[in-house]
Image (spheres, rainbow, N blue to C red):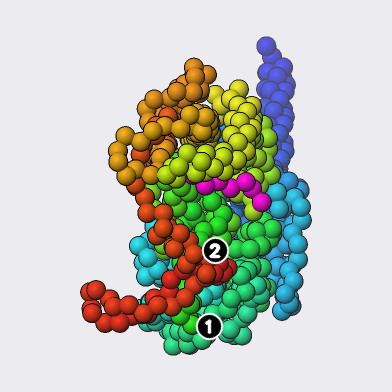
Amino acid sequence: MSMATRRTAESAVDMDVDSGLSVRWRDAAAWGMSLGAHIVILAMLATITYSVSELRHTEITSALDEVDEERYKFETTISDQIGSDSNIDTLIASQEAAQNTGQTPQEEMKQKIDELNDVVVPVTDEIMQPAAAELLAPASTTGQHTEHTGGVEGAVDRLAWEIANQLREKKTLVVWLFDVSPSLKERREIVANRVENVYKQLTQLNNDSEKALKTAVASFSERATVITEEPVDTAEDVVKAVRGIKSEESGRENVFSAVQLVFNKFLPHRTKQKRAMMVIIVTDEAGSDSDRLEQTIQLARRYGIKCYCVGDAAPFGRRDVEIPFTLENGETVLGVMTRGPESYYPELLQLGFWPSGDIELTSSGFGPYGLTRLCAETNGLFFLSSETGVKPKDPQLMRNYSPDYRPIPMIDADIKANAAKRVLTELAIEQNSSNALRFPYLQLAFRADTDNALRGEITEAQRPVAELDYRLEQLQNRLALGEKDRANVAEPRWQASYDLAMGRALAMRVRAFGYNTMLAEMKATPKKFENAGSNRWRLVPSKEISSGAAVRKLAKQATDYLTRVVDDHPGTPWADLAERELVTQFGWEWKEDTFDFARAAEMAAERKAGPRIIEEVDPKTGKKVKRVVGGEPKRLDI
């Protein structure tokens, strides 16, 4: 290759290299510019994302700082299944609200909070009715609702602990609401004495200038009265207000209307001053205005107000009780009080016992339904300060037999779906109504100094038992309509209630039929006395059932039902009643004895003459004392 040609080739190579390097530099520059642009864009996007996230976080924090966080916290629990083993999983109101929230929950929440903060509550006796959907929304009622505190003093001490815990979280307003019935005078005095000590212990939590603890006092009977127009700060002022309450004999205790009144009166302390609010009800009755229960519950839940009650246990399966009571003027009356039942509907048939008479007053171990449910649904507690009747053997055991505290529409639907529950509820309502047929007094002793006297008394005794047997047959037939669904009853409380009702109805039919048979045979062929001086025949229980095979079959069925109650539900009031029924034999036999009919006539005349005062010597002290004899005590709603 010539020199010229080689130089030309080298020049060409140099040009190609330069050209390649130039291309690589241009590519590198473009790639670098693209990389830089992307980095800038990513940085901008990252900044925007961070800002939005920070903004959202700030909005939520500032909104919740201004209100009670618990009120807007979405819970994930389902409605409680107390004593029912229910398989109905129903979302509570707050969870339903969470599911129905729109695409801008922060804006909706902020709007609701602003509306709450702008509330101005007028002081009137009326309060706004919640929406129907809100009334039907089930609440979470988990945990124990009733506490046995060992009397009024124990209840107040336990309340002091509740107040102290609340004060550690935020400023608190406590409203004491007292029943002014004469039967509550002693309890009000006990509360006043105890509060004086308790509040002095709480003063260390009340030293700030705004007074973390404020207290108001109100009372109620037919109408409610606010005693402290403005909340007070000292124990002395609280005690003075409580001791100034005067007893009234109105016969009505509109407790739920009274609770709504204090809500209405003191709600600004909750919404404006951001205080926690606790309402403590002190009463010994169930209340006369249960139709306002649902509305009261929803208002308390809406504003996050806890309700507590210091009250008496409801009588087992009964609405009213009659207890001797001495008025302030010294007069002794038969006090009629509405203390139950412990369930929304009565579940116990009011059937007496042969030969001992009426059913024994027994405590249910729970507070009355309405007040207990109000406490449960507002995260408060019902404190049992006194039992009504014989106390259950084991309060812990009775937790398995808690009444159904779900909303009433859910209770109605459950009862309607099961024939055993439905017929029992219908019969129990009829038995507890004021115009229900009461268990008649059946004569068991018959004057027999002559055959004519004996036949005359038997004829009179047969009249009520004929009607009783007819009604018992109806009772048995109606309960039998529920037997097909008895196997589907899962709740121990309903199982015990149905089996006890069926067993007792059958046992009473056996006794009534046998009683009538024995009377008819004695009337047709009077028996002769074996002992000299005998002048009366008495019917006493016997193992022997002489009324035929059909009646003995009913006796076997009754024994099976009652034995199942005793075996499956030991230690409960249902088992106690079943055992009492089984103790008395189902058959009858005649026994002869001697009786002073002259003295009996004198005593009957004394009762007919009405009450009178006599003076006699007390055998223990030797002093003369006055005593009221004859007549029946006056019945009075107290």
Whole-angstrom CA distance, mark 2 to mark 1, is 20 Å
Pinpoint residue 370: horizontal percent, then vertical percent. 59, 56
Provide the residue span drawn in magenta.
Answer: 435-443
Question: What residue is at 47 percent from the left and 87 percent from the top?
Answer: 240
Report helix, strand or loop for mark 2.
strand
The first of marks 2 and 1 along the sequence is 1
- What residue type is disc 1 on? Ile
Above or below residue 596? Residue 418 is: above
The majority secondary structure of the magenta stretch comes to: loop
Amino acid type shown at disc 2: Met
In the image, is 439 to the left or to the right of 51? left
Residue 320 visible, this orientation: yes
Q: Nearer the viewer, residue 560 or 388?
A: 560
Graded by Cα atoms within 10 Å as few (under 14), some (14 to 19) or many (20 or more), the crowding at tag 2 reads many
Residue 84 on image: x %, y % = 53, 38
Residue designated by label 1: 245
Q: Is residue 21 left or right of residue 612?
A: right
Residue at (40% x, 77% y) in the render: 614
User: Which quarter of the rendered picture does the N terminus lie within?
Assistant: top right
